[in-house]
Image (spheres, helix red, strand yellow):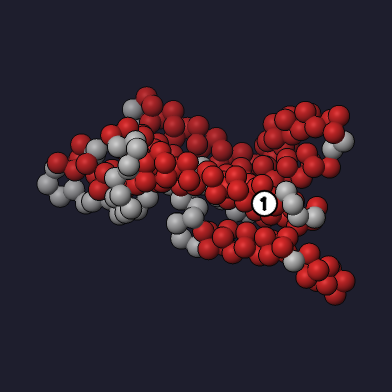
Amino acid sequence: MGAVFGIFIGRTGYVLATALVSLAIYWELPSRWRLTALLVPLALAILVSLMAPQAQQRVLLVKTEVTALMRGASPGAGETSSGVRMNFWKNSLLAIQKQPWIGHGVGSWSSQYDALQPASALAGYVPTAGNPHQEYLLWGVELGLPGLALLLAIFIAVWRLSNSFKQQARRAAQSVLVATMVACLFNCALLDALIGDFLCMSLALVLNFGFHPAALADQTQTK
């Protein structure tokens, strides 16, 4: 936790850490106090802002970048991390609106984004080669709303499957699943760089322990 908030600069990591700590606290609270867990993320955010100046600065940077983009105060506002994401997300929603039921096809996000960019009509425009930095929008653009529903159904199925596991394996599986779902809000976490490999392999491992509790017991006894 110290590394996430004190050393790392990724803002998605701050959100993930807050979500997972909040989930852990929720599980440990007596049932009559479960509703108070809704206040835990806010309390953690305040604590982090007081104890981790770097995290606070990175979060405030998001506000500054978004405000500049909305006001159009700076010609480069759309080129900041937050500005680029907002532009990606806006055009992704427009692309989904054009083909909501069948999508535009696998691998079509870049071409759809470029088609909605005014600059694409200018000479020298370099076509986009990337993703919308949001897994749900990627599936929506390329596979339509049915594809997005399929992705959500996969997450729900994994959660329901993990409910049959013993407590340790269940909480491990659901923690990794929550981390994946939250990461997908800010990145194409199942596609982008190595984070998708890490999340999918981690989920596979914790599901394996859920299916084979004897193996988990052996590992615990060995330690």
Residue 84 position within the rendered picture, expressed as x and y whole percent measured from the top left: 37, 41
Which residue appears at 67% of the width and 42% of the height? 19
Q: Amino acid at mark 1?
A: Leu
Q: Nearer the viewer, residue 202 or 117?
A: 202
Q: Is residue 32 left or right of residue 132?
A: right
Q: Nearer the viewer, residue 90 or 12?
A: 90
Q: Is residue 196 left or right of residue 162?
A: left
Residue 195 position within the rendered picture, expressed as x and y whole percent measured from the top left: 53, 59
Q: Identify the image quadrant of residue 58.
A: top right
Q: Quadrant of the C terminus?
A: bottom right
Give the residue number, with chain letter if any, for mark 1.
Answer: 161
Q: Nearer the viewer, residue 185 or 49?
A: 185
User: Please, what secondary structure does the residue beneath circle 1 have?
Assistant: helix
Outermost left residue: 123
Outermost bottom residue: 222
Which residue appears at 65% of the width and 47% of the height? 159
Residue 7 position within the rendered picture, expressed as x and y whole percent measured from the top left: 63, 54
Q: Is residue 9 left or right of residue 109?
A: right
Q: Is residue 27 visible?
A: yes
